[in-house]
Image (cartoon, rainbow, N blue to C red):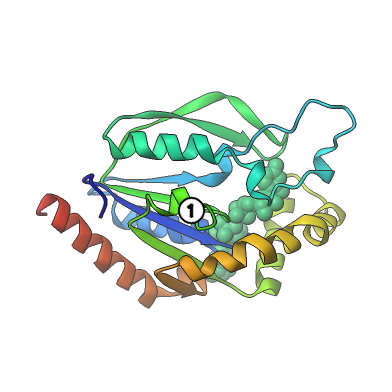
Amino acid sequence: MGNTSCVVIGLAGGSGSGKTSVASALARDFKDKGAIVIEQDWYYRNIPEDSRIKASDWNFDHPDSVEFSLLIDQLKTLRKGEPVEAPQYDYKTHSRMKETRRIYPQPVIILEGILILDNPELRSLLDIKIYVDTDADVRFIRRLQRDIHERGRSVENVITQYYKTVRPMHETFVEQSKKYADIIIPQGAENYVAIDVLKTKIKWLLREAHGR
Ligand SMILES: Nc1ncnc2c1ncn2[C@@H]1O[C@H](COP(=O)(O)OP(=O)(O)O)[C@@H](O)[C@H]1O
Ligand SMILES: O=c1ccn([C@@H]2O[C@H](COP(=O)(O)O)[C@@H](O)[C@H]2O)c(=O)[nH]1
């Protein structure tokens, strides 16, 4: 563990791999000790205000689309035991909301997002590095259903974006970051054995930090 008393878990993996589901399962299990999930997606930059730039053409899967410097600063602040004002993101308008969300430091901090293991400085702040590994066809089907039902997208829109940016960026940045993982979880939150192993390790690190 780093020089603070919280355990920071980084969860990466392709879009639709099950990161959010694994993060929620862990947060539920550590609710009594205090756990918080921080999403990489909250830190998306706004698309530049230029009428020629359309959201449907924007690359949301390249590391430059995310304000990692802010995410790293806020994680360091939380590790020091201080609260942060985390940004919030609206997928329907592709923009940061006016409101922020106050996040208080917790013994268990779970950071989830497609590029969490790609950024070297962010990696150095993680106590446990996880990659959720799910086949591309399954990820695509899940994304298609989710983006239509929850993110206001059409079938055409999801398919076009997948070919244009999601798939190539996954191959260039996400898939290659798997090599930095301490643990690779196939099947996401359904992999109860892997989740149990992970929970044991987190408990061990918490005991080491707090004697509890
Ligand atoms: N094991 C699973 N079986 C079926 N559907 C799942 C499973 N895991 C996740 N999903 C669904 O797939 C979608 C994407 O999962 P999510 O956990 O949000 O992935 P990610 O955060 O990696 O994009 C969600 O709608 C979720 O309910
Ligand atoms: O405005 C936006 C912002 C992001 N996306 C897509 O979201 C995924 C990452 O979220 P997951 O929950 O990990 O799937 C990323 O692949 C972006 O393409 C978007 O479509 N629009």
- Residue drawn where x is 34% and y is 29% of the image: 83
Q: Position of residue 93 (x, y in %)?
A: 73, 34
Q: Quadrant of the N terminus?
A: bottom left
Q: Quadrant of the C terminus?
A: bottom left
Q: Position of residue 130 (x, y in %)?
A: 44, 64
Left or right for 68, reference 104:
right
Q: Which residue matches tag 1?
A: 120
Asked if residue 150 shows in the view, the reply is no
Left or right for 81, reference 76:
left
Asked if residue 94 shows in the view, the reply is yes
Q: Where 2 falls versus 174 (above or below)? A: above
Amino acid of disc 1 = Pro
| Pick the front one: 184 or 69 | 69
| Pick the front one: 164 or 194 | 164
Left or right for 176, reference 192:
right
- Residue drawn where x is 44% and y is 75% of the image: 191
Report which quarter residue 199 is drawn in: bottom left
Q: Position of residue 112 (x, y in %)?
A: 49, 52
Q: Which residue reaches farthest right?
A: 52
Q: Within 10 angstroms of label 1, few (less than 14), some, or many (20 or more) residues?
A: few
- Residue drawn where x is 74% and y is 63% of the image: 167
Q: Where 114 falls versus 93 (above or below)? A: below
User: Disc 1 on helix, strand or loop?
Assistant: helix
Report which quarter residue 139 is drawn in: bottom right
Left or right for 212, reference 125:
left
